[in-house]
Amino acid sequence: DTGVSQNPRHKITKRGQNVTFRCDPISEHNRLYWYRQTLGQGPEFLTYFQNEAQLEKSRLLSDRFSAERPKGSFSTLEIQRTEQGDSAMYLCASSPKERVNEKLFFGSGTQLSVL
Amino acid sequence: RKEVEQDPGPFNVPEGATVAFNCTYSNSASQSFFWYRQDCRKEPKLLMSVYSSGNEDGRFTAQLNRASQYISLLIRDSKLSDSATYLCVVKRAGGFKTIFGAGTRLFVKA
């Protein structure tokens, strides 16, 4: 399977702990996105990478969130000092560089539960 | 006001029915438009892009009205397998953010 891979699938943590998620995009895709989705809502944009450069970050993202894509391949999303409100599905998506209509390929997501 | 708004539904329709969903967007600089489908507990997947002249893919027809800033999706001859959440998606010109609506839930019943 050469789709977008996310690990872990599920993460349960206690409030105040740090967590890190990993995303491996489709290998030839240079664009990578992180989204967060809660029940009954659509995916909410968090951040975007083109190769290793983080080009956009949502204003909704607090300082406790950081994302990296050090070599332009896989990416990590870290949440420090987790809060119960961080409980959500964290989705990663990648896309190739196309001219106009850009299809996003999503991974299966990491479901975070903060107790 | 959300940048992309959809009627959350749910729409409950019998098999074979025709159903239509609308979506409005607030940013007139929006450039690209899509419909994604999301099954329960699964990731979103592209259903179809939406072009200015309107486009059709089998039983699915998408329309774009730039003047009124709305997008529609029409599903003809509904199947049980069409039951899902349909997400309206908008991408701004010159930017990277792809904005998702909250989705419209569809239940097709036998």
Image (spheres, coloured by chain):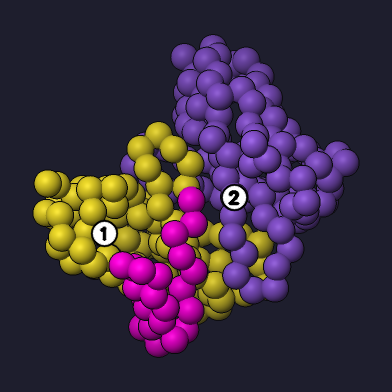
Please give the name of the residue rendered at 11% of the width and 54% of the height, measured from the top-left corner: B14
Colour given to chain B in the rendered image: yellow
Crowding near the residue tagged with mark 1, few <14, some 14–19, many ≥20 C-alpha atoms within 10 Å: some
The circle on residue A79 is: none
Residue B62 at x, y = what percent? 37, 73
Please state if B58 lies on the left or on the right of A35 as rendered.
left
Same-chain check, marks 2 and 1: no
Colour given to chain A in the rendered image: purple
Crowding near the residue tagged with mark 2, few <14, some 14–19, many ≥20 C-alpha atoms within 10 Å: many
Q: Can residue B73 be seen in this view?
A: no
The circle on residue B7 is: 1
Instruction: Locate the N terminus of chain A by quadrant.
Output: top right
Residue beneath disc 2 = A105
Residue B25 at x, y = what percent? 42, 70
Pick whichever, B24 or A60, lies toward us.
B24
Which chain hosts label 1? B
Is residue B39 highlighted in magenta?
A: no
Q: Can residue B80 be seen in this view?
A: yes
The kind of residue tagged 1 is: Asp
Please give the name of the residue rendered at 36% of the width and 62% of the height, measured from the top-left corner: B5
Q: What element carries label 1?
A: loop
Specify the principal SS of the magenta part. Answer: strand
Q: Is residue B49 above or below residue B83?
A: below
Please give the range of residues in magenta. B45-70
